[in-house]
Structures are given as structure tokens and as C-alpha cells.
Image (cartoon, rainbow, N blue to C red):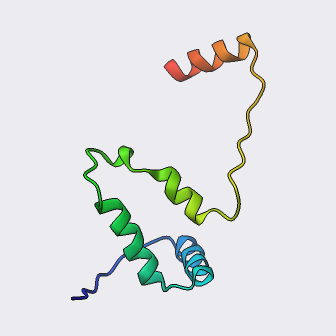
Amino acid sequence: MDAKITLSFDAEVVEAAKEYAEKQGISLSGLTEFLYRKVTRYSYRRIDDLPVSEWVSMVAEGPAEYKTLKRSRKNVSATYFKDEK
């Protein structure tokens, strides 16, 4: 049995989701249901335990591109002490 719900999202998120769903050949409701099924399929103790990387791969417009900066010992120390404040 289907149930209707009302959700509020940022307008930009809605537009991006609509475009993604259209490219996938499904409705926005279908996409939302798919994501809810993924979330509720397993028992996660915390929201941080959700497999976010899978979702990022699904909605990304291309392969992930990781950029790292060359870090000197001085920069690493500065970052560490800054984060500790």
C-alpha cells in the first residue's frame, strides 16, 4: 500500500534530484523510496555509520576526484594544533 508524505528540502537539492531521477528514468518519488530502502535495509547504530560513499557514487556526475596537498611537517603541526583548539 502506498502512503503519501510531505517533505521540505532546499530548492537547489530538489532540482538536482529531479534532474538525476530523470536521467535514471525514474520519478523523484521512486528515487526517494530507493534511498529510504537503502537506509532502512540494515540496522545502523548511528547515522554516521550509513554507507554514504555508495550514495555519492550513485549521484555523482562522474568518477570521484581526490585532491591532496603536499604537506610539510610544519603544515601538519599547524593543522593539528589548529584543530585541537
**Residue under the image location 43 percent in, 50 percent down:** 51
Q: Is residue 9 left or right of residue 12?
A: left
Vertical comparison of 53 with 61: above or below: above
Name the residue nearer the viewer: 71 or 33. Answer: 33
Q: Is residue 64 left or right of residue 80?
A: right
**Residue under the image location 51 percent in, 84 percent down:** 26
Residue most extreme to the front: 41
**Residue under the image location 24 percent in, 86 percent down:** 3
Vertical comparison of 40 with 45: above or below: below
Relative image position of residue 35 (x, y in whole percent):
41, 68
Residue 49 in sight: yes
Vertical comparison of 6 with 77: above or below: below
Q: Is residue 63 left or right of residue 36?
A: right
Name the residue nearer the viewer: 50 or 85. Answer: 50
Name the residue nearer the viewer: 82 or 30. Answer: 30
Relative image position of residue 66 (x, y in whole percent):
70, 42
**Residue under the image location 67 percent in, 16 percent down:** 76
Quadrant containing the N terminus in the rendered view:
bottom left
Relative image position of residue 79 (x, y in whole percent):
63, 20
Residue 85 in sight: no
Name the residue nearer the viewer: 69 or 49. Answer: 49
